[in-house]
Image: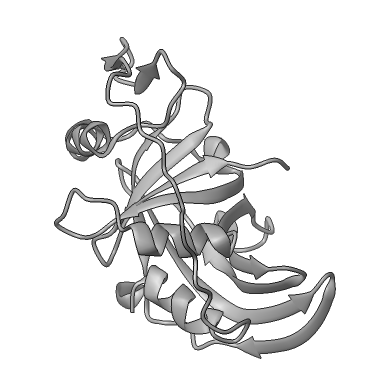
Amino acid sequence: MNLIKFLFLDALLLTVVLVIMNLVFKKNDNSKSEISIDENNQYSIKNDSMELPSIKELLELEKISRKKGSSIVFDSLIGNWQFQSVWNSGKNNNNSIASSLLKIFSATLELRKSEPNTEHLNFSICNSIQFGAMKLEFIGYGYLKGPQPLLPFYFEKIEVKIGSFIIFSRKLDIPEPSQRPFFSLIGMGENSDWLSARGRGGGLALWIKGRE
């Protein structure tokens, strides 16, 4: 099961289906942007209007990252990443329903340095969705692998909280390494203000850096 479906299924623990209308996503097709590659083969999207990259730009970055790597390093990934958009596998159109729901539920990917004695696990990872004071968290570990790189991960437990109080906690079965989900990292903004990756299920996601 891919990560997005996993989040949707467990979101049913939090609330009933919400009817969301009149969500408006502004686009500016006249914005000027370009992909630049420096002498160290690091690349970025420079956008004069400070807008997020388009799907066309992300697909171009994905081609580059597969050939030369994304140049994304460990320290640049540390922080809270708020979900912004998702595109379906094999399609260039935004999945507006999924994007809208994940925004409504404040879907966030949190990456932190793991305990120093945890072998081969560089990150502690928390994927969360929230509705009001209630939050659902999937907590586990991940690490970087390969030149692109990949970010394989797994969740070891699930928690439901109201504020800081845990009302439900359950351990999850840890999958074998070959069965674990991963993010194939595509690109990151010049100031580490956005991050894009493709999941194992084929969907392409875009996050923006949240406040600490």
Q: Residue at x 40, y 50 (%)?
A: 85
- The spot of residue 47 in percent (x, y) is 38, 18
Please determine whether, in this image, residue 86 is positioned above or below residue 71.
below
Q: Quick one: quadrant of the N terminus?
A: bottom left
Q: Quadrant of residue 89?
A: bottom left
- The spot of residue 193 in percent (x, y) is 53, 32
Q: Is residue 49 visible?
A: yes
- The spot of residue 188 in percent (x, y) is 42, 33
Please determine whether, in this image, residue 199 is positioned above or below residue 25.
below
Q: Quadrant of residue 126?
A: bottom right
Please determine whether, in this image, residue 4 is positioned above or below residue 166.
above
The residue lying toward the viewer, choosing from 157 and 90, is: 90
**Colour scheme shown:** one colour
The residue lying toward the viewer, choosing from 122 and 97, is: 97
Q: Residue at x 44, y 28 (%)?
A: 189
Please determine whether, in this image, residue 134 is positioned above or below residue 196.
below
Q: Residue at x 73, y 43 (%)?
A: 212
Total marks placed: 0
Task: Report whether 136 appears left or right of 11.
Answer: right
Q: Residue at x 59, y 59 (%)?
A: 106
Task: Report whether 3 appears left or right of 193.
Answer: left
Task: Report whether 133 appears left or right of 182.
Answer: right
Q: Is residue 119 visible?
A: no
Extreme-front residue of the structure: 22
- The spot of residue 122 in percent (x, y) is 55, 54
